[in-house]
Image (cartoon, rainbow, N blue to C red):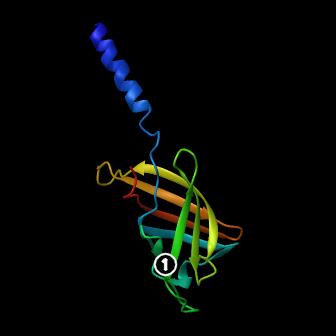
Amino acid sequence: MKNFILVILIYFLSTSCSDVGKTQTLEGMWAIQSIRYGNMELNNTYYGNLITFHNDGSCELPLNRYGQLSDDGSWKQSLDKKGKIISIKIISEDSIFNNLFLTTNKMFFDPEDGSNLILAGLTMKSQNVEIVLQGRLTGFY
């Protein structure tokens, strides 16, 4: 009986500390759910609805329909002490994306395919712009 209790105790201690030192990363492809500038919805302003963050610091952004601005940019994320993403700086010719965004995110398991892959909802907010993304966090450890 003592061995059983010891095994249970070790299991709970090891799983309760499993998030310590884990780092979030945005690397991968994200679908844009919405882009807002103040009260204006801007989804129809762009060709496509994907943002891809590459591990070399570059990113691919949707092309603006009206200004024909470049769809290339760069990005950098800032993390808190626990390794959670707190802000994202995107540098782009497009003033909507060229911002420092504070972030909030929501993680959940994908109920449709029943796998353990994590889906993420990410909201990026600057002073005037709000971008809501959804994607799989392939770099989540």
Which image quadrant for residue 97?
bottom right
Image quadrant containing the N terminus: top left
- Residue 76 screen position, x and y as percent: 54, 66
The secondary element bearing badge 1 is classed as loop
Q: In this view, does 40 lie to the left or right of 49?
A: right
- Residue 21 screen position, x and y as percent: 46, 43
Q: Residue 86, relative to residue 8: is it above or below? A: below
Residue sitting nearer the eye, 129 or 23: 23
Q: Residue 95, relative to residue 99: is it above or below? A: below
Which image quadrant for residue 99?
bottom right
- Residue denoted by label 1: 61
Q: Residue 60, relative to residue 124: is it above or below? A: below
The residue drawn where x is 33% and y is 15% is 6
Q: Residue 63, relative to residue 36: is it above or below? A: below
Residue sitting nearer the eye, 83 or 118: 83
- Tally of numbered tags: 1
- Residue 75 screen position, x and y as percent: 53, 70
The residue drawn where x is 67% and y is 67% is 126
- Residue 13 screen position, x and y as percent: 41, 25
Neighbourhood count class around disc 1 (C-alpha, 10 Å): few under 14, some 14–19, many 20 upward: many
Residue sitting nearer the eye, 2 or 111: 2
The residue drawn where x is 49% and y is 70% is 32
Q: Which amino acid does label 1 sit on?
A: Leu
Which image quadrant for residue 125?
bottom right
Q: Is residue 76 left or right of residue 116?
A: right
The residue drawn where x is 58% and y is 92% is 67
